[in-house]
Every structure is written in structure tokens, then in C-alpha cells.
Amino acid sequence: MTIVVTDITLSIVRLDLVHEFETSSHRKSALEHIVIAVRSSDGAIGWGECASPSDPYYAGETTETCWLMLRDYLGRHLLGQPWEHPDHVAALLARVAGNNFARAGLEMACWDLFARVQGQPLAQVLGGSAPTIEAGVSLGIEHTIDDLLQQVAHHVADGYRRVKLKIRHGWDLEPTRAVRTAFPDLALQVDANTAYGREDIDHLRGFDDLGLLMIEQPFDEDDLLTHAELRRRIATPVCLDESITSPAVLRTALQLGAASIVNIKVSRLGGLGAAREVHDDCRAAGIPVWCGGMHEFGIGRAANLAIASLPGFVLPSDVSGSDKYYALDIVAPPIRAVDGLVAVPWNSPGIGHEVDMAIVELFTRRTERLVLADGAPVRGRTARRPPRTPPERRKP
Ligand code: OSB
Ligand code: MG
């Protein structure tokens, strides 16, 4: 069936985190994601979420660059173009180089639209099958080891069975050892977000005593060779996150032996189609994968859940319940983990959660519509509201 998108609404929505989050590269207390609604000429609606951080410290994009790319380029390449499958949408959007977070949000909206038009769950149209996803939590850098132990205890009491700790120089072996000592049987892994260099390989080997599932992205995203070297010199499995920005990079990384495990992140890869391709290639190569996140609101989180239901996702994901990060979710029912498991919504079409428009409007800072007028894409009206809290701060 042919679908034509004739109307795109972009909204910057700001939600406060319930607990400040710090990684080796940045600290944040609120997030601004772009909620994207696409409407077809038949009146069907699909939802997407652009989960770029506000500042370019995890990847090169920001909320504002995504806004500009969606408004001035990606939206125009989609509006009025007939397509049969979201893979065709990906091909239309591929005319724009880079800008994966922006591209992922719009492609996701088209996947949701496509699945709703078929009357099928997103997980089904992606080829998924798992009834539930094993959820893990990602814990930021805390002020003290006691604060960290308290966070771990809180989430273990909530039923989570896998915990990821953010690490950097000065916050690595000691806090991880403290958690391991206090929770000897916990499934535990660490994530460096590129904080280390080749000179740190001997230091990182210190993690081998701690029984970790993996060490994630210790080195720069471009530095596949040093990841391959670490993999030869450490017993702990090496996982890539930031490095894997496309199926082609994935194949290069596997060829070089740079990854024992891959973190699949929809936004970093530029969409669900690329995420599925990386999943398929890893599965064929015998490389286990898991689903990473960018603190998504309910729309992006539901899409993560759908992709994580594919059979190669054999390790616990970062798809926790929304309540771990936000007091309110923008979808109903909210996404919740029960006993460390999140249910895939197999009984509803699309992302399987309805968008709560009252909540979206309450937290919208800016909105703009792109429509077709006489067959050509044009911009609608823009509304602005001042932000309530300061933007994310760069770590010194
Ligand atoms: O490296 O996985 C990461 C959040 C922001 C930037 C990078 C990362 C993260 C997370 C979030 O760890 C995990 C989640 O969304 O649950
Ligand atoms: Mg990571």
C-alpha cells in the first residue's frame, strides 16, 4: 500500500530527570527531545522521537541541529513522496549526509505510521518475537561511592537484575569494586563513553577481577584499532557503542576484531532500519547485541522495546521503565519494568502506546508544522516559550 506524508509536526518537549545524570562527557538534569508526528494523506498518524542530547558531547548533533535538519531538509525530502515501506523512507532521507539522530526520529515516525496502517505492532513489522525484554539500568557518576551503592540498592530492590555503571578516570575500579563486593551476584557492566586512551590499557585490565559482562566504549569512537588491541589483552568482553554509526562501520569493526558485543542504539544508527541491519549482521557473525538508549521519552522507548524483541538481543538492554528517569511519561500506558522485565505491547498496532497530548502540550517549548501547499513543502507557524531551566553543562 502506498503512503504519502502530507503533514509533519515537530515539537521540542522538555522533561526533568528525577535524578541528575553524569557521564564521563557531560551532566544533565533535564532533556529536550523533538516529538515528531507525521500524518498521511489518508489521515493516519505516526509518532517518532528525536533523542539527541542538547549539547554535542555524546555525538556531534544537538537538539537545535536536529530541529534545523528536520525542518529545512529531512521533512522536505519526505513530504509528498509516495512510499511503500519504511526502507524507502530511509532511502529518501539518505540524501542528507550524517545527522543520524534527526534522521532516526523521522524514520521512526514513518515506521509507526506504517505499522498502524497495517494494523500490526511495530515489533511484528520489524520481525521481533520476544514477549518481554530484560531491562537493565544505567547509573551515572555519583558524588560518593555510598551514593552509588544507594542507587544500585534502590534499583535492585525495584527488580532490575542488570546494572551498568558510568566510569571515567578517578571513578572506575574503586566504585565498581565496591558495587561488586556489595552485590556479588549482580549482572554488572561499565561504560566509559570514550574517556580512555591506548595508554590506559594496562589500567583497564584491572576490571578483569570484577566479573563484568562487558566494558563499553573505552576509547574514541574512531579508534577501532585500539578497541581491537584491548580485546586481545583483556578477558572482559569489549562492547562498542559510539563507534557503531552505520552497518558499514559495524562490518569494519567486526573485520578488525574490535567488538565482542555491540550496543544497538536506534538514534545513533539513524533509524530502526539500520538498527535491524546491524542486528542481522551481528547475529550472522555470532556477536551478541543489546539495546542501548538515550533516556528516551515514551515514544523512543517504545521503539527501543520493539527492536529489542528481535532474536539477536540476547543481553539485557538499557530499556528501563520510564519512571526510573521521569516523573511523567508522554505515552499511556507508561512503560514500566516489572521484576526487571518490560512487556512488548503485542496487542496494539504501531509503537503500542498512545501519545498523551495533554502532557506533550504541557511540556512543549516550541512547535512547528510542515505541510504541502500546492504540492510543495512549506513551513507553518512557529510558537516559542522560554526554557525553564538552564541547558546541560559541559564537564570540566
Ligand atoms: O552511552 O549509553 C550511553 C545516556 C546518554 C548518553 C550516552 C549513554 C546514555 C545512557 C542512557 O547510558 C541509558 C538509557 O537511556 O537508559
Ligand atoms: Mg554507552
Image (cartoon, grey):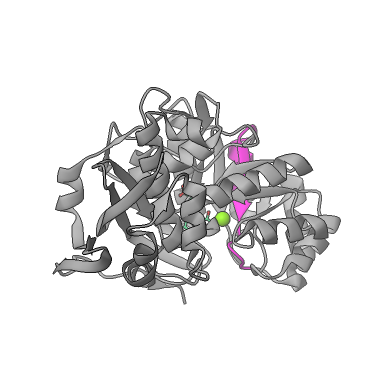
- Identify which residue, 354 or 295, lies in the foreground: 354
Q: Write the start and end of the magenta stretch as one range.
A: 178-195
* Residue reaching furthest to the right: 232
**At 71% from the left edge and 45% from the top edge, which residue is drawn?**
282
Above or below, 230 against 38 in this view is below
User: Where does the image place residue 375, in percent across and percent down from the top left?
Assistant: 26, 63
* Viewer-nearest residue: 101 or 321: 101
Q: How many marks?
A: 0
**Rendered view: 318 above or below 107:** above
Query: Left or right: 97 with respect to 54?
Result: right
**Furthest-front residue in view?**
374
Residue under the image location 70 percent in, 46 percent down: 281
Going by the image, does 96 lie left or right of 45?
Answer: right
Q: Is residue 329 above or below residue 118?
A: below
Indicate the position of residue 131 as horizontal and vertical percent values: 50, 23
Residue shown at 43%/24% (left/top)? 346
Asked whether 179 falls inside the magenta stretch, the response is yes
Q: Considering depth in this image, is 318 or 190 the residue closer to the camera?
A: 318
